Amino acid sequence: MIYPTAADWCHAEKRRVVLFAMSGLGKTHVSTMLRETGDWFHYSIDYRIGTRYMGEYIADEAKRHAMQVPYLRDLLMSDSIYIGSNLTFDNLAPVSAYLGKPGAPERGGLPIVEYRRRQEQFRRAEMQALLDTGDFIDRAETLYGYPHFVCDTGGSICEWVDPHDPDDPILTALTERALMVWIESGTDHMAELERRFDRAPKPMAYQPAFLETAWERYLAETGLRADAVDPDSFIRWTYARALAHRQPLYRAMAENWGVTVQADAMAQVGAEADFIDVIAEAIDSAPQRR
C-alpha cells in the first residue's frame, strides 16, 4: 500500500484514495463532502464513463427516439436543434437509461442481444475510466493544484478485475497511485439495499458469465420467452444474486489490495478529519502483507 502505516497516511502531504462498494453505501456522499473542503479533487468513474466514453452512444439513442417524431426529425435533419445528455455527479440517469434492462419491448425492455451489446460497451468504458485514474491524479495536482484526490468508483468495478491475480492491470494501476478502500456493508445494510432496489430497480452492469447464467436460470424458472420478460422483475430477481456474487470479490480486493471500512463507520464521517481518522484505523487494522 502507498500508505504502509496509519502515521504515513495521517502525515501525508498528498492523500489519494479509491472508494469501492455497492451503490448506496456512501461513496459519492463522502466524495462530495471531501470535494467541498476545497482541497480534494473528486473523480467520478460513472461521470467519466458518461461524458467521455459513452456520451455519443447516449446522445445517439436519444436522437433515435426523436427521429420517430416527425416534428423533431425535421429539426434534427436541418441541424436546428441539439440533443445531448445533461450528466452531473448527482444525476447519472442518462447512463442508466442507456444501459437499460432486458425484456419485453412494450414494457421498456431491450432484446437480450442489444442488452448484451450495451453491457459490453459499458464494460470497456468502465475499465478505461478506471485506468484513467492516474492521469486525473496528475491533472488534479499539476493543473488545478489539488493536494488530495478521491476516486468514486461504480459498484461494478469488481466485475472487471481479478483480485486474486497479483498482476491484474487495473488493480495494479490503481494501487500504485492510491489507497483502495472498501466500504463493507453489514447484514442490515444489505437488507436495506435490497428494499431500496425493490422500490426503484435501476440498471446494473454484470460480468458476462454471471449475466448469462442469471438470464437462462430466470427463463427456466419462470417459463417465459425472452421477449415476454418483465424487465423490472428480472433485475429485481437478479439483484440479491448480484450482491452475493460481488461480496467475495470486494472482500478479496480489500484483503489483497487495500483496506476495509465498515459502512456504519463511514456513515458517521461528517468532516475531513473524521475521514482521515476512519482511514487511519482501517490501515492499522489491515493484515500485514508480504
Image (cartoon, helix red, strand yellow):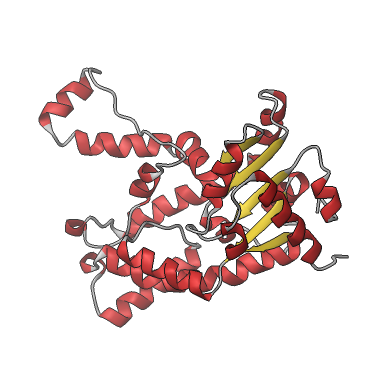
179 vs 106, left or right, is right
> Quadrant location of the N terminus?
bottom right
Q: Quadrant of residue 281?
A: bottom right
Give the percent coordinates (x, y) of residue 161: 63, 58
Q: Quadrant of residue 235?
A: bottom left
Residue placed furthest toward the bottom: 221
Task: State the residue at coordinates (22%, 39%).
Answer: 65
Task: State the residue at coordinates (52%, 48%).
Answer: 29
Task: State the residue at coordinates (61%, 41%).
Answer: 34
Give the percent coordinates (x, y) of residue 109: 26, 57
72 vs 177, left or right, is left
Task: State the residue at coordinates (85%, 49%).
Answer: 8
Q: Quadrant of residue 211?
A: bottom left
Give the percent coordinates (x, y) of residue 253: 68, 63
Residue 205 visible, this angle = yes
Residue placed furthest toward the right: 290
